[in-house]
Image (tube, rainbow, N blue to C red):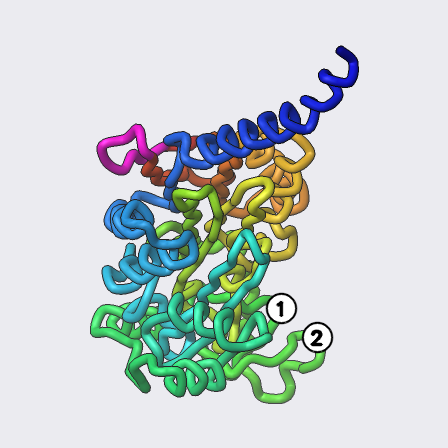
């Protein structure tokens, strides 16, 4: 009897293993995926990503499709070409894509002359061993890999905005503790120059933390996609802060700040004052907090509070989503909205988060 029971043990183990495999397969296609989440009511971008992932696209491909749609639509004038002129009146692009399975990242920053930021970031991830390319060299790379360009990224709207800013003595701006030669610079360190040098006595000390940073002049699309197998990717695209100092790079192309994903845990997307937020890597913080068992709502709030303790005047927000599809948002200094599409929804739903 004992011998018979022992002889049947391998069969029982095999049966149990096969049953576990079947259950695992059913769990991966249990109906909770796919999911698309994005900062702000960028509904058309979320719909585009949803159509892609619902038709079998990978998470990476779907997030590229969604962010590309936002670039084409020039969402809020802060994504894609034609918005957020710098001090010279030029529009540049920052973008990032991250694969939460392989942890590969591709990004471009301060990219000139190329409209399709998220596709350029994807090319960096797909065809190089690098993570981030910047400036005109990023543009040359993107064009060499087949993206259209060189193209003037300014628009009549961005030039008009820049012209009015110049007429307002280039205020507000992102300089501090400097003396301008004239109302719009060039600027020199106040401590190193005396007024006897013939410089204008007017000083500039505009703290960008107290400047009017808002959704329509300082924003990012940050998107997370779970594909049908539950694999995660995130992507971002932005034309940065309006009237930024040329060469400035915000948090948009910085993995862990504007977005982060780990296939074992979940994902996060961020928007707001990137100059401050990138110092804290809030999305990395959110994902790691969820890894330790924190629910998305608490993880998001914790990330915001860490920044607010040091910079109480900052403006920003994050969304968090875990592997179970549970999502939440948190913000500081403004009212935040984020968009979600999941299998149980008939269309995109916009959630509002109060500070």
Chief secondary structure of the magenta portion: loop
Q: In the rendered view, tell whether residue 41 sits above or below residue 136.
A: above
Residue 228 can be seen, yes or no? yes
291 or 187: nearer the viewer: 291
Q: Residue at x 37, y 50 (%)?
A: 215
Q: Residue furthest top?
A: 1
Label 2, residues with CA under 10 Å away: few <14, some 14-19, many ≥20:
few
On screen, residue 196 versus residue 74, left or right, reads: right
Task: Give, as a single range, the part of the protein colored magenta.
Answer: 343-351
Q: Which residue is mark 2?
A: 191
Quadrant of residue 290 within the rendered picture: top right
Magenta-colored stretch includes residue 348: yes
Q: Residue at image x 54%, y 77%?
A: 128
Q: Is the residue 35 above or below the residue 210 in the image?
A: above
**Residue 117 place in picture, x, y as percent:** 39, 69
- The quadrant in which residue 157 appears is bottom left
Q: Are marks 1 and 2 in contact (CB under 8 Å)?
A: yes
Residue at 37 percent across and 43 percent down: it is 36
> Is 189 included in the stretch rendered in magenta?
no
Q: What x and y, as percent, mark residue 342?
A: 34, 35
Q: Secondary structure at mark 1?
A: loop
Q: Is residue 119 left or right of residue 98?
A: left
Q: How many marks?
A: 2
- The single residue placed furthest to the right in the displayed view is 2
Q: Is residue 169 visible?
A: no
Question: What label does residue 177 carry, if any?
Answer: 1
In the image, taking residue 210 as reference, residue 76 lies left or right, namely left
Give the Cα distance between marks 1 and 2.
8 Å
Label 2 element class: helix
């Amino acid at each position: 009897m004992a011998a018979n029971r022992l002889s049947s043990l391998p069969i029982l183990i095999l049966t149990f293993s096969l049953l576990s495999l079947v259950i695992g397969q059913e769990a991966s296609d249990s109906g909770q995926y796919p999911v698309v989440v994005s900062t702000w009511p960028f509904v058309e971008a979320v719909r585009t990503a949803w159509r892609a992932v619902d038709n079998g696209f990978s998470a990476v491909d779907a997030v590229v499709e969604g962010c590309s749609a936002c670039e084409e639509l020039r969402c809020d004038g802060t994504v894609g070409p034609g918005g957020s002129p710098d001090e010279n009146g030029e529009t540049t692009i920052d973008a990032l894509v991250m694969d939460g399975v392989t942890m590969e990242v591709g990004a471009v920053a301060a990219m000139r002359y190329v409209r399709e930021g998220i596709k350029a970031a994807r090319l960096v991830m797909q065809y190089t061993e690098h993570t981030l390319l910047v400036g005109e060299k990023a543009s040359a790379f993107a064009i060499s890999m087949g993206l259209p360009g060189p193209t003037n990224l300014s628009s009549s709207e961005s030039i008009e905005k820049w012209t009015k800013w110049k007429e307002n003595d280039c205020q507000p701006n992102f300089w501090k503790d400097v003396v301008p030669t004239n109302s719009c610079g060039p600027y020199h360190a106040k401590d190193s120059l005396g007024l006897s040098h013939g410089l204008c006595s007017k000083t500039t000390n505009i703290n960008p933390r107290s400047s009017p940073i808002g959704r329509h002049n300082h924003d990012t699309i940050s998107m997370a996609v779970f594909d049908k197998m539950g694999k995660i990717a995130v992507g971002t695209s932005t034309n940065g802060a309006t009237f930024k100092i040329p060469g400035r790079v915000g948090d948009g192309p910085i993995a862990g700040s504007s977005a982060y994903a780990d296939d074992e845990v979940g994902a996060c997307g961020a928007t707001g004052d990137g100059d401050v937020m990138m110092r804290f890597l809030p999305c990395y913080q959110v994902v790691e907090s969820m890894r330790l068992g924190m629910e998305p709502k608490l993880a998001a709030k914790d990330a915001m509070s860490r920044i607010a303790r040091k910079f109480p005047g900052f403006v920003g927000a994050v969304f968090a989503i875990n592997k179970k599809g549970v999502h939440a948002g948190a913000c500081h200094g403004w009212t935040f909205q984020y968009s979600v599409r999941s299998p149980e929804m008939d269309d995109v739903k916009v959630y509002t988060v109060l500070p």
